[in-house]
Amino acid sequence: MTLYTESNQQRLSMIDWTEILNKIDVDVPLGTEQFNIECPFHVDDKPSLAINTEKGVWICFAGCGQGSLKSFIRTKTGWSASAINKFIADNSSGNTENIFQIKEPAPLGLPPLEEKEFPFKQYMVPKWIFDRGFTKFTLNKWGCGITSTNGLVIPAHDKDSKLVGWVIRREFGIPKYVYAKGFKKSQILFGQHLVDTSNAVCITEGALDAMWLNQLGYQAVALLGMQMSKVQEDLILDLPSKEIILCLDNDEAGKKGRDYILTRLSNRVNISYLKLPKQYKDVQEVKNCDIIKETIENRRIW
């Protein structure tokens, strides 16, 4: 796969139009470069306005207009050209100054994915992921990439290291995680292909939580949600470790998921759970390694 290199055209194309359009109340679906929305310039139930974020253009098929996305912003907001340029500069994290290349093949020994398998720029990552504390080594290890809208792409493998899909983590917006079409996330434990010792395994909800704990030296897998499926239950029981530490999110949904898993697994493995300080909603928010270590050491045994 050819690694991404910069040019003037590519610099222009890396403007994060998704982020910008979201900020002017246009709901942009993730994972696609071209889509239709209801036109804000007329009563519309089709929808009849098409946007292409890669080319930076729009057109209303009902006749309201067409042009660059800058002209769309001007038509929608009434702002001046200088105000629009400043708005884009202030709000786009998708410029090339915020794109980083991680050049080396993954230390796992997994080869770079073919473009047809991984239709994103692999081994390129957005700056915001470094702001969260992740290192180049970790992102390289997981074979991460970037979408055209500045999302982080994480390949998902089964326990035999076979690619089965990918996870897209958005910097902003809801949902935070989006998954490849046809990817049955309940059929794998994200990160299981990296579990190779009998040391305790942490179980998280999100992919970034598992990656974060892995970076800190702990074995970790993610359910990719708060629910544990029957397949995932069997995969947990098949892990080389018989000691499980639940590290689900620190909210009511996470607690419900935790209690369900405790009920299902309590008599079959040694299981415990973390009790995070109230100010943290998940383990990835805890940047102080000593707090993570102390929390794990003081985990609640079930």
Image (cartoon, rainbow, N blue to C red):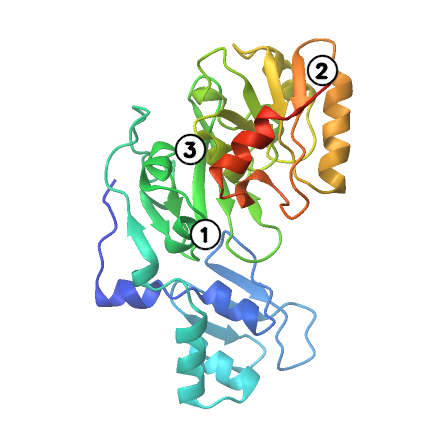
- Residue 41 lies left or right of residue 266; in this view the side is left
In the picture, the disc for residue 215 is: 3
Between disc 3 and disc 2, whose residue precedes?
Answer: 3
Q: Residues within 10 Å of mark 2 (few under 14, many from 20)?
A: some
Q: How far apart are marks 3 and 2 (CA)?
A: 26 Å
Q: In which quarter of the image is the N terminus?
A: top left
Q: Callout 3, which amino acid?
A: Gln
Question: In the rendering, at what x and y percent does residue 175 appear?
Answer: 61, 51
Q: Check the image and report above or below for 238 versus 277.
A: above
Work out whether 19 lies above or below 265.
below
- The nearer-to-camera label among 3 and 2 is 3
Residue at mark 2? 265
> Quadrant location of residue 67?
bottom left
Mark 2 lies on a secondary structure that is helix
Question: Mark 3: which secondary structure?
Answer: helix
Q: Mark 1 near mark 3, Cβ–Cβ under 8 Å?
A: no
Classify mark 1: residues with Cα within 10 Å, few (<14), some (14-19) or many (20+): many
What residue does disc 1 label? 151
Q: Which mark is residue 239?
A: none
